[in-house]
Amino acid sequence: MKLGPSLHRVGNDIVAAYLVDTPDGVTVIDAGLAGQWGEFTAELEAMGRTLQDVRGVVLTHGDSDHIGFAERLRRDHGVPVFVHEADAARARGEVKTKPSWGHVKPGATAQFLWYAVRKQGWRVTPVAEVTIVRDGEVLDLPGSPRVIGMPGHSPGSIALHVPVVDAVFVGDALTTRHVLTGRPGPQPAPFTDDPAQALASLDRLQGVTATWVLPGHGTPWNRGVDEAVQEVHRAATA
């Protein structure tokens, strides 16, 4: 799905990954679920690109629904995978997490689980080798993503500000569609390790100028960063 001249989404409002396309190549932000590989390669083809144009995969964190096809890209095509140092062990499959599900609605939860099954969410391949990133670093990748540390959802959760596509990619620092309830709009994401810390980390987005706020789950938001953050805080106190 094309969001802008150099900005593409793979997947849907349940699970999404993103592509930044520049003359220097393609940066993949998150790798969704393993079974989204076909959609990913189809999107590359629609862009006039191939796997040889992919310069790197940056993970907003190391959860299973974000590392999906990352190892396949690394192992089979030599594409480096970048992740914050605090989530490196998570991405490598060395840390097992048991987050709380919280409030659920059967219909929305069933839709999420069925989609995950269809897209091989059960087939999690840890990333064997990762390249470490740190808060404040500007990565030498197409679009020059700037790393913003957003601990809370996981210790190494990050956002990525990419001015060339007027976007900040937030992973699960927030969501615009709660996968367990179906509730739309900016709000705290489920399966969060430390909800209070995740809310506090949203302050780190202050001063970031971007039209697009792009989560790993939910509708792409194009009403700016400040309004998205305000909506999350309102939802958290509702």
Image (spheres, rainbow, N blue to C red):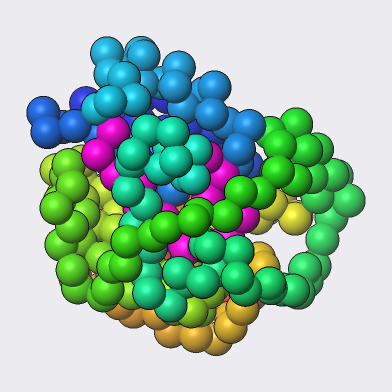
Residue at 74% in and 74% down:
98
> What's drawn in magenta, residue-wise?
54-69
Q: Can residue 199 be seen from the camera position used here?
A: no
In the image, 212 versus 125, the foreground residue is 125
Q: Quadrant of the C terminus?
A: bottom right
- Residue 82 found in image quarter: bottom left
In the displayed structure, would residue 83 be above or below residue 127?
Answer: below
- Report if residue 234 lies within the magenta region: no
Q: Can residue 11 be seen from the camera position used here?
A: yes
Residue at 37% in and 52% down:
81
In the image, 168 versus 219, the foreground residue is 168
* Residue that extends furthest to the left in the rendered view of this protein: 23
- Left/right placement of residue 102 relative to residue 18 reads right
- Residue 235 found in image quarter: bottom right
Q: Quadrant of the N terminus?
A: top left
Q: Position of residue 118 (x, y in %)?
A: 75, 31
- Left/right placement of residue 198 relative to residue 80 reads right
